[in-house]
Amino acid sequence: MAYKYHIGVADYVAIVLTLLISAGIGIKVRYFGNKQKTLKDYFMAGKNMSKFPVILSISVTMTSAISMLGSPSEIYRYGLQPIGNLGMPIGIVLAVYLLIPVYFECGYDSGGKN
């Protein structure tokens, strides 16, 4: 007989707390954070952000939960054939230390205008 899993009270509490914290941060920034006047300030954070949040943002953008959960299972199932996933940390380090400083020095943003 297969055991049926179901969501318990602790799971609902965790989900609700996560959503409330996220909404609270958004409301706080909307009403009490008047530092971002233009879209460029919003998307580029005024170009005064330290390296650590930028590194975290790039790392999270380049990796996903699916790849983090899927890579170990693929390696377990097929061996080291999908070794391309091991190159991702190297790509992240290269992007953070080589590419991002160049973009910031050039004044490039995603809108195409300087």
Image (cartoon, rainbow, N blue to C red):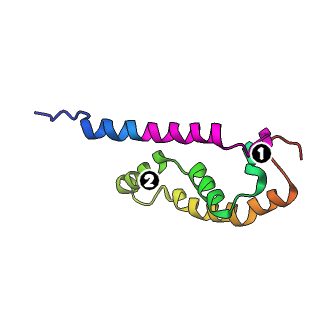
Q: Give the image location of residue 33, x and y in percent.
A: 67, 44
Q: Give the image location of residue 101, x and y in percent.
A: 77, 63
Q: Give the range drawn in magenta.
A: 18-41
Q: In this view, does 87 lie above or below 9?
A: below
Q: Give the image location of residue 114, x and y in percent.
A: 89, 47
Q: Give the image location of residue 4, x and y in percent.
A: 18, 33
Residue denoted by label 2: 71
Q: What residue type is labelled 2?
A: Ser
Q: How crowded is mark 1: few (under 14 residues within 10 Å), some or many (20 or more)?
A: few
Residue 16 or residue 58, whichever sits in front: 16
Q: In this view, does 81 lie to the left or right of 12?
A: right
Asked whether 29 falls inside the magenta stretch, the response is: yes
Q: Is residue 109 left or right of residue 1?
A: right
Q: Is mark 1 on a helix, strand or loop?
A: helix
The residue at the point 51 percent across, 39 percent down is 24
Residue denoted by label 1: 41
